[in-house]
Amino acid sequence: MNVKKALFASSLFLCGVGVLPVTAGLPVAHDESEISSPMPEQQKKKRTITGNVTDGFTGEPLIGVSIMLKGSSDGTTTDLDGNFSLSIPVKAQLEFSYIGYKKQVLDVTDLVVANVKLESDNEMLAEVVVVGAGTQKKVSVTGAITSVKGTELHAPSSSLTSNFAGKLAGVIAVATDGEPGTSSNFYIRGIGTFGGRATPLILLDGVEISSGDLNRIPPESIESFSILKDASATAIYGARGANGVMLVTTKIGTENTKASINVTVENSFLKPVNEVGYVDGARWMEIYNEAQLARTPNATPKYSQERIDYTRSGINPYVYPDVDWYDLVFKESTMNQRANVNIMGGGPKVSYYMSLQANHDTGLLDIPKAYSFDNNINKWGYTFQNNIAYKVTPTTRIDLRMNAQIGNNKGPNASVSDIFYQVYNNNPVTFPAYFPAEPGDKHIKYGNAILSGTSLYTNPYQYMLGSYKEVNYSMLNTSIYINQNLDFVTKGLKIIALVNWKSWSETSYIRWLDPYWYRADSKSWSPDNPGEYTLERLNSSGSEYISQSGIGRGADNTFYFHGQLNYENTFGEDHGVTAMLMYMQREYRNDVLPNRNQGLSGRLTYAFQQKYLAEFNFGYNGTERLDKGKRFEFFPAMSLGWVVSSEKFWQPIEKYVDYFKLRGSYGLVGSDETGSYDGAAHFLYVNNVNLGGGGSYSTGPTYSSIYKKGPSINSYAVQNAHWERVKKMDIGVDMT
């Protein structure tokens, strides 16, 4: 290494590498006029700035970097350790340039020490991909990983997960609800499990979050978004990697940069693209009769021609209704608002990123102000991201990352999907939405009809209007990272520790009115007096007073810890090695007994000339759900890669395909969440017994034995239960 530095220094002396032959700290004059010209007062005052220049990815010191005082011929170069020293004016900008790296301009107004990281100007070599518990250069990745920047997920919507479709290869996004702010369901390469959770594991800065938490993160705060698909990419998560992993990394500030403030304000217009078209009431009855006669030609049509004619003429819309339920319940369009303010920057020791987002979503429901509550959809959500990094010593860095989400949701005590179902499930001619109010009325006279016996239809208008629900939620996710460089032990060694606390809580309540149901007596109606009709009461349970529930509460909290030992080094020009060993433990509590996981994971990679790549991953994970002796499982994975475009025989077609890599992987991943959503007990190896007694119950192997009293079995212990194991093989090609 010393020989290499000496040769590099000699080459600088011989060819200059594009830098001026100057002595550090001493300005060079090119002519006498430049020496004798008067200098501004602020240029006469000088101070000395020192610093270090390193590779932005490897952290290796860069030798011979050209450092110039912008707008001047003064400058210097870095020494064999990447250090420099330069005398500069009070207010100045330094320009750093180096062959193979992007130029960087640094404002050094009040800096005494400036440590600079230069990025490679080769996009493929410079691009860094977030992988499981770390990062790798994209050129050396052998697993199936898709990575995008947060800006690519930007769309005029407060729902981040609704923007996944078509932007992340291998991700299937399904919107199951049109209600604003609702998160989509998404799957990586389909469903890879026969039971339990089929959605991927989601990690925000290394900490697990829910799809709802992810849905409310603004794209402005996301630095990168990585999808881990195959076994080699997900094996280190073992217990949680069977369905793929999503890694979300938020932005951090940059050292020695001015504060940068970014503001986004959006007002979006929302209008359904494909609306359902409904026929009018008269045509509906004609089609119904046609369908009836097609089945039974001799049948008597349900709707008489007289009723069809009266409905078409609109002679009395309460006796012969013709209701367009969709037009009555839904608006043609709505508007939503979103605002984001973020600031980032940093000094020589502290860097920061802070973001505040506000979302205001309204829906397409067209609800009039009929009661003291307004149950139109009205959702406010606030997301705060605060990332601070502090360099305690040149080798020690502490990061504090906090994501807070607060929201208030108001609307009917029914989902929009349910309301839409009632809209299309009701025909337009059976009953009107409501009858006109008369003097002295203290309640709304909703229309209805007898379905069968004493059962009535569901009136979509009342179903939407008659209830109100308010939900308030808050989530706080706080993490502390400690990154200690151990170069003093051996070069390339570092230790990282992460401690995380996550807390979520929600309160809700509902209000409602029992409706009054009426129908018009068609027998009392006469075409001679088309505006007159008699109302008939259909129920006796209506109320003029609002009923209200108690406060419903829900909460959970999570504690997570992991510590990892990383090693990265190059040997000579050809050999590159990285290694990682990580221990983790997690406790999730939403009941008396917590859910716990524990595991040990590792990764080893080797690259020869950045052409021939190999990687081995493993996860040794444990779960409390299984019996002793079966709680821990080993999940290994292996991957290989060949950068074909680096071979000499590729040169003739390099101008057409400048990068081409073959890769393949095979491994085992698992899941301990089998049966989590089908009523199974958390502890699969014990009987779930109900000792409450009272009332009859069924028991026995087939639940066919019926008894009146005594303990009952809610679920039987699963004998010899073990991990769900998923074998994954992947063959891929990367090319540009």
Image (spheres, grey):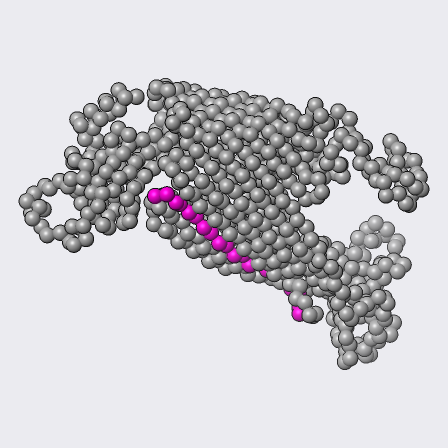
Q: Is residue 593 magenta?
A: no
Q: Is residue 358 magenta?
A: yes
**The N terminus, quarter of image:** top left
**The C terminus, quarter of image:** top left
Depicted 73 relative to depicted 265: above or below: above
Tell me if residue 172 can be seen: no
Q: Left or right? Give the position of 407 relative to 30.
A: right
Depicted 694 relative to depicted 596: above or below: below
Using the image as rendered, state which of residue 266 and residue 366 is in the foreground: 266
Image quarter of residue 74: top left
What residue span does the magenta drawing correspond to? Answer: 348-369
Q: Left or right? Give the position of 30 relative to 393.
A: left
> What percent of the width, then of the height, locates residue 340?
47, 55
Q: Left or right? Give the position of 679 relative to 621.
A: right
Depicted 524 relative to depicted 595: above or below: below
Tell me if residue 340 can be seen: yes
Q: Left or right? Give the position of 631 relative to 662.
A: right
> What percent of the width, then of the height, locates residue 337?
52, 59
Tally of marks: 0
Using the image as rendered, state which of residue 264 and residue 78 is in the foreground: 78
Residue at 18% across, 27% down:
13
Residue at 49% across, 23% down:
604
> What percent of the width, then of the height, locates residue 53?
30, 35
Specify the farthest residue to the bottom: 439
Using the image as rendered, state which of residue 219 and residue 406 is in the foreground: 406
Residue at 72% across, 27% down:
627
Residue at 71% across, 42% down:
592
Image quarter of residue 599: top right
> What percent of the width, then of the height, locates residue 80?
26, 28
